[in-house]
């Protein structure tokens, strides 16, 4: 297949982020691609910023009422001219050889869909580097977010995900879910028999959140998403997904036992020492390693609370999906 790439980016109230992302796309070693920006009902519009790049990129900009990132990706895909769609989050910076890496891989091993990993750029703040560690480390996520040695079958995620036009036409694109729409899309692709692959060299620099408060909200919603996914795809729930909830319960249990014994807390201390040493090895910074312990605690505890809340509301009480911290559902 002659690859014609369409990069589709949903956008909500992040003009500074889209500027950085477009600047990185201008530096690609292979410039044969189009970019489609779908502004999802933002109050802080980015049309002027996008216009300033139209002489350097093949660029299309659309503004639509707010409906969430999944439906905005579908909106962009419906208007794309290419035959292979790549979805990127607005808080990503794209390395210069990204497009070339994707094309080289797909030329050697054609697949219907792919995903790529994420990394922390040297320009990221210490908090962003710590959050990146907690979201990708073996000690926290088990390496399921795009590492080379994932412990479960790799599911492409929407911050760095691509699939053919045929996939979009047969699946209908992203479902109108509140959370977890990207993993749902990956599962449905696999059920349809489409081939998927991880492209290790097609990584992006993913900023995620810049404060721990924002990060708490993000991972809390991810915990909710896991039960939403279970309702649609019961086989998707793995033993690993219970770890954050078990961690949260163990922390609460340990604190309740503090008047009598500190023994449970010693296990937590050893666990976070391992995280500190691993984060120090990866980032070569004591400060980032300290922040990585805090980020890892927030990630596991908040995800666990969201997971348990969703179990209670959706599985025990039998209620439907419920509101997130941010009603627009952007991660």
Image (cartoon, grey):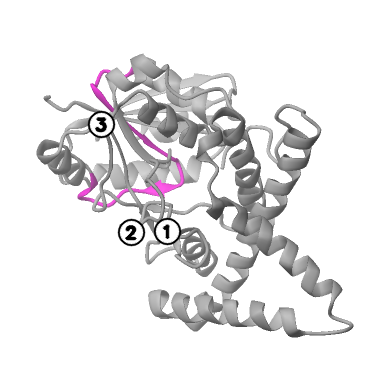
* Residue 27 percent coordinates (x, y): 23, 47
Image point (46%, 46%), residue name: 91
As for residue 95 lying within the magenta part, the answer is yes
Label drawn at residue 143: 1
Mark 1 near mark 2, Cβ–Cβ under 8 Å? yes
- Is residue 122 depicted above or below 96 in this figure? below
Position of the N terminus by quadrant? top left
- Quickly name the residue at label 2: 149
- Quickly name the residue at label 3: 55
Q: Quadrant of residue 193?
A: top left
First-in-chain label (1 vs 2): 1
Position of the C terminus by quadrant? top right
Q: Which residues are magenta?
A: 80-98
- Alpha carbon separation for disc pair 1 and 2: 7 Å
- Alpha carbon separation for disc pair 3 and 1: 40 Å
The front one of 81 and 146 is 146
The answer to whether 86 appears left or right of 130 in the picture is left
The front one of 9 and 274 is 274
Q: Quadrant of residue 270?
A: bottom right
Q: Secondary structure at mark 3?
A: loop
* Residue 69 percent coordinates (x, y): 52, 30
- Residue 88 in view here: yes
């Amino acid at each position: 297949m002659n690859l014609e790439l369409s990069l589709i980016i949903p956008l909500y109230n992040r003009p500074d982020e889209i500027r950085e992302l477009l600047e990185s796309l201008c530096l690609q070693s292979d410039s044969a691609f189009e970019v489609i920006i779908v502004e999802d009902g933002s109050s802080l519009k980015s049309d002027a910023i996008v216009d300033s790049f139209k002489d350097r990129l093949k660029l299309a900009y659309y503004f639509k009422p707010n409906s969430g990132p999944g439906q905005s990706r579908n909106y962009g895909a419906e208007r794309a001219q290419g035959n292979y769609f790549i979805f990127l989050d607005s808080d990503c910076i794209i390395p210069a050889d990204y497009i070339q890496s994707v094309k080289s891989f797909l030329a050697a091993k054609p697949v219907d869909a792919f995903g790529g990993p994420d990394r922390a750029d040297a320009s990221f703040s210490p908090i962003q580097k710590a959050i990146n560690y907690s979201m990708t480390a073996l000690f926290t996520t088990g390496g399921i977010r795009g590492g080379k040695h994932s412990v479960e079958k790799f599911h492409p995620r929407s911050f760095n995900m691509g699939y053919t036009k045929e996939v979009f036409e047969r699946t209908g694109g992203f479902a109108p879910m509140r959370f977890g729409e990207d993993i749902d899309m990956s599962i449905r692709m696999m059920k349809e028999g489409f081939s998927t692959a991880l492209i290790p060299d097609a990584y992006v620099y993913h900023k995620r959140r810049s404060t721990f408060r924002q990060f708490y909200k993000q991972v809390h919603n991810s915990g909710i998403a896991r039960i939403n996914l279970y309702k649609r795809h019961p086989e998707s729930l793995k033993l690993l997904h219970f770890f954050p909830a078990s961690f949260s319960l163990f922390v609460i249990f340990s604190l309740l036992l503090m008047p009598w014994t500190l023994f449970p807390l010693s296990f937590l201390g050893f666990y976070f020492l391992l995280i500190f040493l691993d984060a120090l090895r990866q980032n070569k910074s004591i400060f980032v390693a300290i922040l990585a312990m805090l980020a890892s605690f927030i990630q596991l505890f908040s995800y666990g609370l969201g997971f348990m809340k969703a179990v209670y509301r959706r599985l025990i009480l039998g209620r439907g999906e419920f509101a997130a911290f941010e009603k627009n559902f952007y991660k």
